[in-house]
Image: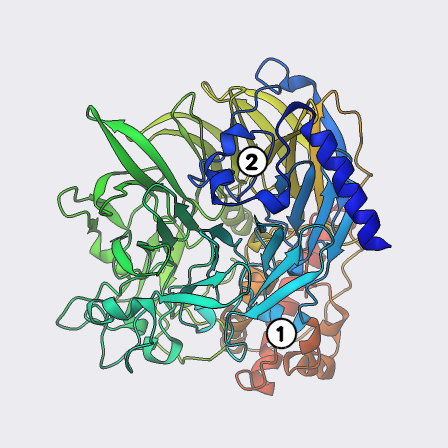
């Protein structure tokens, strides 16, 4: 009965969607239809709308003249308050979207009515390996199936009509701390997917699976195997890559080297090529990962853009954005394809703004650098050598002898939040951010499988309240309109907070973008003038998208309190109150729906225990906290609210329960078991450090007359 009802619902929606456009249907989505996406502008068939991933829509019913009249059409509540990073896919009036823990839902794109939902049933213990929340960036649709990659490493094909599993393929060794947060891509009857987990100790690769059967067709490893060939597509360049690593020593031989391709994978339909954005090393610090020696120590293919044959995975060319990366300057960020007129010639280009602060334009034929220019403050170089394509490094930035304050931070001048490009203005719209990082080599580094391994010391927040506010307020962000031909800024809009969301450009002369403080805004694509703003009630970081059902254009975005900024960066989200789960919010001109009210009031912080330890012991507690706890519970124990704020936790009050929690009592809930790494003595010092941080919060709240309305800093 359910399948029959669902089929009727699909037929009705397809009829409505087809009133003013061709009727495609999920069964007809293939490479030809994605290449011809502009003939079906009301659909959004792949992650970046087209294979070029420019995130530009020809729809113009919503435009600079009427966007101010846009209102909420409908809203759908997601099942969790964790990260919501997906770009929805819409095919003939049906929206397919993912939420935290890799769950998938199909919705009526005109009304928000649920058609089906699928629970990935990911063990919550797997969340301990998700550095930046248990988020998911979306699905791929191909020949009647919806493909999703799960946080625990599976690639699953669902029937588009009812969500039933067609096949499921394990893509990783689950005994290792792999995760997947990226969206699959589909082309040539293949489904492409990468993975994450470099900081925890894994070796990255990209795999291609048969879309019909799930059979593995090829695999390309992004770091070389020092023990021998892998019987993989990457074997042809194994020796080339090995020549750029220290083969005698370094933690990379234990960790696998990292290089995970956790986000950007782009199919080039003109060259039948797959572009892979490769991530950071494991550990981050090159002096720990691959100590300097008399040779090339670039560590291929870390922090690189790699092009391979889409059918076979055979290596074709690469460009390394950050040779010998030591700052977590991943090149996993959005790769965009285009044809630009440069110095009077049409050039097929690939463009990227990776973490390192530059915007790169590469020749798609041979991966050679055409141009590069800084889009944000950066201190690790003095420029890019245009002849060699290599950065001109500031040697002090490598912190070999101790410490260095470096821009950008590991959060990047640009992170995973998608760019967009307008075919009207020619500008690329980039979410940029400014934030420095104090890098210090961990002189006592020990590789810990499955734990956070960076080879750097993670400092806490200063104790002085004024200094603490100065640090947390030093982050800034902007929406940057960038001219990629002339490599210069067209306009820039300063935003509230560093972690600003993905962008969408439309033929209505509009750019849409969300922000970490919970707004979705529309700007004039030519001038940057803000034309519309909506309170989305939660951080709006995913790439927005637009589509049409019948004769109505819609704009969709996701909002939630998840993401790394509500974990490791210590942005405080509400915990108490109603309706705090993430949402899919959809807008149209004349929309009159409203969001349910949200309660942002926190309960009062309990008085923390008085644990008096010597200053040296407190420093030890801070160091252990920084090594093992900082990444999830935030610097200075400033919790983001999507997982427990341990300053407010009752566990803090009881030494025995505290130790049991650290030693695995709550592993099934996602709290790691640190019994191999944190002794009972160190656990108590960590408790003393957290209690000290809790005392700061407790005193602050009482000085301000109670906790009501506090945001938790």
Residue in view at x 79 percent, y 48 percent: 6
Q: Residue at x 42, y 59 (%)?
A: 261
Give the mark nearest the N terminus, 2 or 1: 2
225 relative to 279 in the view: left or right = left
Mark 2 residue element: loop
Residue closest to the eye, 67 or 603: 67
Q: Residue 434 is drawn in which quadrant?
A: top left
Number of residues whose C-alpha sits closer than 10 Å to that of mark 1, classed few (under 14), some (14–19) or many (20 or more) = many
Q: Is residue 600 visible?
A: no
Confirm whether residue 532 shows in the render. yes
Residue at numbered disc 2 = 496
Residue 243 bears which disc, if any? none
Q: What residue does disc 1 label?
A: 688
Single out the residue that lies furthest toward the top.
65
The answer to whether residue 684 is left or right of residue 231 is right
Q: Position of residue 208 (x, y in %)?
A: 44, 61
Image-based side of 412 in relation to 4, left or right: left
Q: Give 324 or 625, whichever is nearer the viewer.
A: 324
The x, y position of residue 28, in whole percent, is 58, 43
Quarter of the figure with the N terminus: bottom right
Residue 598 percent location from the top left of the image: 80, 42
Q: Give the SS element for disc 1.
A: helix
């Amino acid at each position: 009965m359910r399948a029959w009802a669902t089929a009727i619902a699909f037929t009705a929606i397809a009829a409505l969607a087809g009133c003013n456009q061709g009727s495609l249907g999920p069964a007809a989505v293939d490479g030809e239809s994605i290449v011809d996406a502009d003939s079906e502008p009301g659909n959004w068939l792949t992650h970046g709308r087209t294979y070029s991933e420019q995130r530009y829509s020809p729809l113009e019913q919503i435009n600079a003249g009427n966007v101010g009249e846009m209102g909420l059409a409908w809203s759908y509540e997601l099942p969790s308050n964790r990260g919501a990073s997906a770009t929805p896919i819409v095919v003939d009036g049906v929206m397919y979207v993912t939420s935290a823990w890799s769950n998938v839902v199909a919705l009526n794109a005109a009304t928000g009515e649920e058609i089906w939902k699928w629970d990935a049933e990911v063990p919550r213990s797997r969340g301990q390996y998700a550095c930046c929340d248990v988020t998911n960036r979306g699905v791929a649709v191909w020949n009647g199936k919806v493909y999703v990659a799960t946080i625990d490493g599976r690639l699953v094909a669902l029937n588009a009509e009812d969500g039933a599993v067609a096949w499921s393929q394990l893509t990783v060794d689950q005994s290792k701390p792999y995760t997947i947060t990226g969206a699959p891509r589909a082309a040539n009857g293949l489904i492409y997917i990468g993975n994450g987990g470099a900081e925890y100790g894994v070796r990255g690769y990209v795999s291609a699976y048969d879309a019909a059967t799930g059979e593995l067709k090829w695999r390309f490893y992004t770091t070389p195997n020092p023990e021998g060939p892998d019987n993989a597509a990457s074997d042809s360049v194994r020796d080339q890559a090995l020549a750029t690593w220290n083969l005698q020593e370094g933690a990379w031989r234990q960790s696998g080297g990292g290089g995970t391709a956790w986000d950007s994978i782009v199919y080039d339909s003109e060259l039948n090529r797959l572009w892979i954005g490769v991530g950071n090393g494991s550990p981050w610090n090159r002096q720990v990962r691959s100590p300097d020696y008399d040779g090339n120590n670039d560590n291929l293919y870390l922090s690189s853009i790699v092009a391979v044959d889409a059918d076979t995975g055979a290596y074709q060319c690469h460009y390394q954005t950050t040779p010998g990366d030591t700052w977590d300057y991943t090149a996993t960020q959005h790769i965009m394809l285009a044809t630009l007129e440069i110095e009077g010639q049409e050039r097929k280009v690939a463009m990227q703004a990776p973490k390192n602060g530059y915007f790169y334009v590469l020749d798609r034929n041979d991966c050679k650098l055409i141009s590069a220019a800084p889009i944000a403050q950066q201190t690790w170089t003095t420029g890019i050598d245009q002849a060699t394509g290599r950065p001109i490094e500031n040697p002090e930035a490598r912190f070999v002898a101790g410490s260095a304050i470096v821009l950008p931070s590991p959060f990047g001048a640009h992170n995973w939040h998608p760019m967009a490009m307008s075919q009207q203005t020619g500008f690329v719209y980039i979410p940029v951010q400014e934030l420095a990082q104090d890098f210090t080599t961990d002189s006592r580094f020990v590789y810990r499988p499955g734990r956070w391994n960076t080879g750097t010391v993670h400092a806490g927040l200063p104790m002085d309240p004024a200094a603490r506010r100065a640090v947390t307020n030093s982050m800034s962000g902007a929406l940057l309109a960038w001219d990629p031909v002339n490599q210069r800024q067209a306009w820039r809009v300063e935003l509230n907070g560093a972690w600003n969301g993905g962008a969408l450009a439309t033929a209505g002369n509009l750019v849409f973008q969300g922000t970490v403080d919970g707004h979705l805004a529309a700007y004039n694509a030519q001038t940057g003038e803000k034309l519309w703003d909506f309170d989305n009630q939660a951080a709006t970081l995913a790439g927005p998208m637009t589509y049409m059902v019948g004769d109505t254009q819609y704009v969709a975005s996701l909002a939630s309190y998840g993401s790394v900024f509500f974990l490791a960066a210590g942005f405080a989200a509400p915990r108490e109150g109603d309706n705090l789960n993430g949402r899919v919010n959809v807008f149209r001109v004349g929309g009159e729906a409203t969001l349910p009210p949200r309660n942002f009031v926190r309960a009062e912080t309990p008085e923390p225990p008085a644990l008096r330890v010597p200053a040296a012991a407190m420093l030890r507690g801070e160091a252990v906290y920084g090594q093992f706890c900082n990444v999830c519970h935030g610097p200075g124990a400033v919790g983001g609210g999507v997982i427990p704020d341990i300053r407010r936790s009752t566990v803090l009050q009881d030494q025995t329960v505290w130790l049991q929690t650290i030693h695995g009592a709550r592993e099934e809930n996602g709290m790691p078991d640190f019994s191999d790494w944190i002794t009972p003595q160190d656990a108590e010092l960590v408790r003393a450090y957290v209690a000290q941080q809790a005392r700061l919060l407790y005193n602050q709240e009482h000085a301000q007359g109670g906790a009501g309305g506090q945001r938790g800093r």
